[in-house]
Amino acid sequence: QVQLVEFGGGLVQPGGSLRLSCEASTNIFNFNAMGWYRQAPGQQRELVASILRSGDINYGDSVEGRFTISRDGAKNTVNLQMDTMKPEDTAIYYCNAKSGWFNTDSWGQGTQVTVSS
């Protein structure tokens, strides 16, 4: 069973930066895609950013131009650099991996990100 462990959540002021990392228990190139989702209180979980095995990248509209997703195959990690952060970025951030014919989802435990002065 795939294990995903997130690191790097916390409190940041508006306009600040934060970096999240997700470490997988297996070779990340075994996955069809990896990415980050977030869920704010009372909201549905939404895509933040994803990177396909091919290297193609997708961003959610609300983070385009501010967040950057990257991966490190040697460390089996996927990272999310978050810049120019806004209070509306406050949420629990989840690492996600999709695998197999049916794009079966695996999830990390989530890490809290709070943007507040």
Image (cartoon, rainbow, N blue to C red):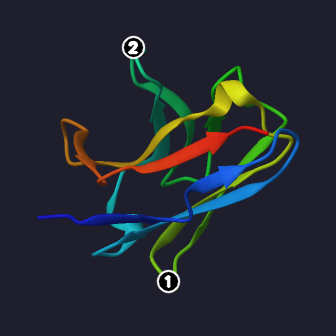
Quarter of the image with the N terminus is bottom left
Q: Which residue is mark 2?
A: 42
> What is the distance, in whole Å, between disc 2 and disc 1 at their CAs?
34 Å
Along the line of sight, which residue is nearer the eye, 47 or 38? 38
Q: Residues within 10 Å of mark 2 (few under 14, many from 20)?
A: few
Where does the image place residue 105, in percent across and percent down from the top left? 24, 42
Where does the image place residue 85, in percent across and percent down from the top left? 79, 39
Q: Is residue 107 left or right of residue 40?
A: left
Report which quarter residue 44 is drawn in. top left
In percent of the image, x 39 and y 14: which residue is there? 42
Q: Which residue is mark 1?
A: 75
In the image, residue 20 above or below residue 50: below
Which SS class for mark 2? Answer: loop
In percent of the image, x 83 and y 38: which residue is there? 14
Along the line of sight, which residue is nearer the eye, 69 or 43? 43
Q: Is residue 3 visible?
A: yes
Q: Earlier in the sequence, mark 2 or mark 1?
A: 2
Which SS class for mark 1? Answer: loop
Where does the image place residue 74, in percent across and percent down from the top left? 52, 85
Given the image, on which type of amino acid does mark 1 rest? Lys
Given the image, on which type of amino acid does mark 2 rest? Gly
In the image, residue 95 above or below residue 3: above
